[in-house]
Amino acid sequence: MANAVCVIPIECKFGPISAFAYYVDAPEPAIIDTGVNVSAVQDIAPTLAEHGIRIEDIRWILLTHGHVDHLGGAYAIWEKTGRNAKVVIPKKEARLLRDKNEQIVDYKSLQGKYITDPAIQEKHITMLTTDISGTTEPDLEVVEGDSIHLGGDITLKVIETPGHSIGSVTFVLDELNWAFAADAVQIYGGLSGIPTIENPTLYRKSIHRLLEDVRPNRLFLGHPFRNINGDMESAQIEGEQVATVLQASLDMDAKLKDSARRHLTNGLPAEQHELYGPFGRVAEEIGYTGDPRNLPCAFFVTMHGYHEELIGLQIK
Ligand SMILES: [Zn+2]
């Protein structure tokens, strides 16, 4: 077994939710994910300072995917390092780092499709774009099989774990087999009460791969997620719990798929629920009671994904 590597989880808070960034101590220190715009100043620099670490000394900014609560702080951290850190993002989501408008394009093709009130749409778009500290060209666009050397014998391997988003990757600390999967694993969903799954077919494959092939010793997630009882669990998971949460993620996927099959097979129902649009019956069946007018509105993203899977519209 390799020497343990010091990882500092940093909870980046915004509104009622939080997203984790992870500092990885190495000759070339890395931060995996970056919270939102304010996180560098509000959470990341102060937490690192408690450990005697300067945010300025970070040399790698590694993004698991392009959602604003993971990518939003990247530019601010990069500036703090005197633009010396290398910014790394999955190739399939690099456009989200280059251009804020790409967030709006994605919003409109997913949850925005089902948010009918233009004032709420506008509010969401404003939130999404103000949560990003800036745009930049990535230094590296990673794909399956790439490795990032943080100096010494510390290497992160890139494995593609799409599904939560189309380009999500997991960074795996070699030898220790610690997996920074962030949102690629959703268990029973976060605070919004449902997993965020853009593409269920890919999500299922990614979870099976983590469970059966990668078999991480530790799993570092992007948020605290719910367990089967609805309680929030820690975002840092180890030992036997790793397999338990991966299996729970598959169980929740099966439940969503089954409900979608029963209610959405013949196209989207004409019947419109006041909050849940064409997905009222699925919401009722799975016990979802959240308000999709609040961001992050996982509900519509996920319903859209399962409906498209049913009608054969998704990339496999
Ligand atoms: Zn995400």
Image: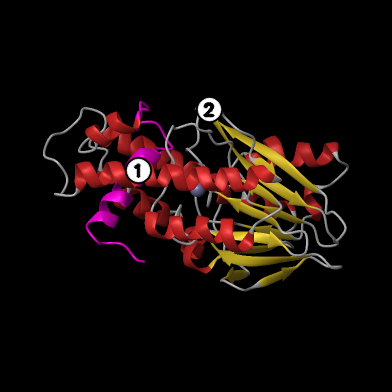
> Residue 201: horizontal and vertical position, in percent?
38, 58
Mark 1 and mark 2: span between their CA atoms? 25 Å
Res 137 quadrant in image: bottom right
Going by the numbered disc 1, the residue's amino acid type is Leu
Q: Position of residue 226 (x, y in %)?
A: 53, 33
Quick one: 274 or 34, which is closer to the camera?
274
Numbered badge on residue 40: none
Q: Residues within 10 Å of mark 2 (few under 14, many from 20)?
A: few
Going 41% across and 57% down the picture, which residue do you hit?
102
Q: Is residue 132 visible?
A: no
Pick whichever, 116 or 194, lies toward us: 194
Q: Which residues are magenta?
A: 287-316
Compared with 282, 260 (above or below) is below
Q: Quadrant of the C terminus?
A: bottom left
Residue 309 quadrant: bottom left
Please identify the quadrant where the N terminus is shown.
bottom right
Q: Position of residue 142 (x, y in %)?
A: 58, 70
Disc ID at residue 16: 2
Say which residue label 1 marks: 256
Q: Residue at x 57, y 56 (%)?
A: 211
Left/right placement of residue 162 relative to residue 232 reads: left
Report the number of numbered marks.
2
In magenta stretch: residue 263 = no
Q: Place residue 159 in its image quadrant.
A: bottom right
Task: Give the colour scheme shown.
Answer: secondary structure
Q: Is residue 264 left or right of residue 166?
A: left
Q: Is mark 2 within 8 Å of ligand 1?
A: no
Residue at far left of view = 270
